Image (cartoon, helix red, strand yellow):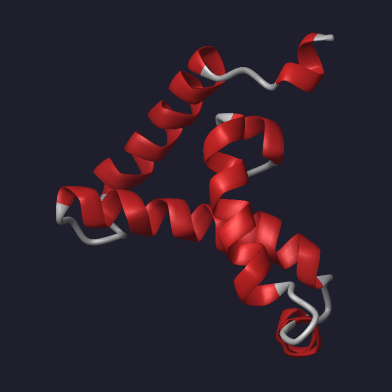
Amino acid sequence: MFNHSSYGVQGFEVIYRALLKMFLSQSKLGLTTQLALPISAEYFVRKVLIPETALGLISEDFSLAISDPFVYKTLLDSRAFGMVMFPDQDSLS
């Protein structure tokens, strides 16, 4: 459902870099791997934590509950906007 190409690449990268330090650093990788089982820690970060982080940031920006449908709609709208405004340069070559 959520993947790298679904986000504006810049937003994905900013969130990913922050989560990388928090959950995939050398000192945290073992615990994250245990918590993510049966999936890999990397997959968990990309498919669970990145979307949830994006939803949390949007809900905070609008002072809404994360479960508010407007939050998810805003995520979907922002992904489309991000792909147009900040296309993945690797996919253009």
Depth order, front residue of 72/92: 92
Q: Residue at x 66, y 75 (%)?
A: 23
Q: How many marks?
A: 0
Specify the quadrant that holds the C terminus. top right
Residue 41 in percent (x, y) is at 78, 72
Is residue 93 shown above or below 7?
Answer: above
Please, which residue is most extreme toward the left here? 63
Q: Is residue 43 left or right of residue 81?
A: right
Residue 8 in percent (x, y) is at 55, 29
Depth order, front residue of 16/72: 16
Q: Residue at x 59, y 42 (%)?
A: 12
Q: Is residue 91 visible?
A: yes
Specify the quadrant that holds the N terminus. top right
Query: To which quarter of the image does residue 63 belong?
Result: bottom left
Residue 14 in percent (x, y) is at 55, 47
Residue 70 in percent (x, y) is at 25, 42
Q: Residue at x 71, y 86 (%)?
A: 35
Q: Residue at x 74, y 90 (%)?
A: 31
Q: Is residue 69 left or right of residue 2?
A: left
Query: To which quarter of the image does residue 76 belong?
Result: top left
Is residue 58 shown above or below 6?
Answer: below
Is residue 73 shown above or below 26?
Answer: above
Depth order, front residue of 44/11: 11
Q: Is residue 7 visible?
A: no
Depth order, front residue of 80/8: 8
